[in-house]
Image: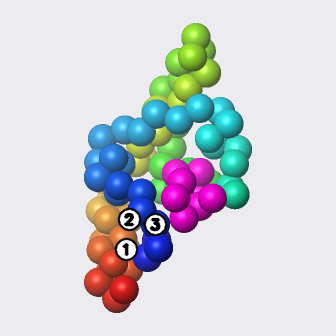
């Protein structure tokens, strides 16, 4: 999380990703969303069958607050 250039504010709402995006864990520095999904910070909120896209979001406010707290801590110790 310290090295990512990913705009973490994109997670404040929901983030839309393709099936391919979720299966790839190769570039977690620039594309950490699959890691956040695999670790349970993000869950599937919706699926668009026509476009093959998932909408991901935090499962609840408690997880969101914990994640953002962890993220801020990592950035401050950078």
Q: Residues within 10 Å of mark 2 (few under 14, many from 20)?
A: some
Q: Is residue 57 left or right of residue 53?
A: left
Q: Is residue 8 left or right of residue 16?
A: left
Depicted 37 relative to depicted 18: above or below: below
Query: Quarter holding the C terminus?
Result: bottom left
Q: Can you tell which quarter of the image residue 67 is in?
A: bottom left
- Point out the tag, 3 or 2, that comes first from the N-terminus: 3
Q: Residues within 10 Å of mark 1 (few under 14, many from 20)?
A: few
Q: Can you tell which quarter of the image residue 50 is in?
A: top right
* Label of residue 67 in the image: 2
Q: Secondary structure at mark 1?
A: helix
Residue range corresponding to the magenta coloring: 27-35
Depicted 50 relative to depicted 43: above or below: above
Cα–Cα gap, marks 3 and 1: 14 Å
* Label of residue 5 in the image: none
Furthest residue toward top: 50
Residue at the spot x=35%, y=56% of the render?
A: 8
Depicted 63 relative to depicted 66: above or below: above
Residue identified by numbered label 3: 4
Q: Secondary structure at mark 2?
A: helix
Q: Is residue 32 magenta?
A: yes
Q: Residues within 10 Å of mark 3 (few under 14, many from 20)?
A: some
Residue identified by numbered label 1: 70
């Amino acid at each position: 999380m310290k090295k990512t250039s990913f705009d973490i504010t994109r997670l404040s709402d929901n983030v839309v990703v393709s099936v391919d995006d979720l299966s790839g864990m190769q570039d977690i520095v620039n594309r950490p969303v699959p890691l956040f999904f695999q670790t349970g910070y993000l869950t599937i909120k919706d699926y668009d069958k026509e476009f093959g896209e998932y909408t991901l979001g935090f499962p609840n406010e408690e997880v969101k607050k914990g994640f953002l707290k962890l993220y801020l801590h990592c950035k401050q110790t950078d």
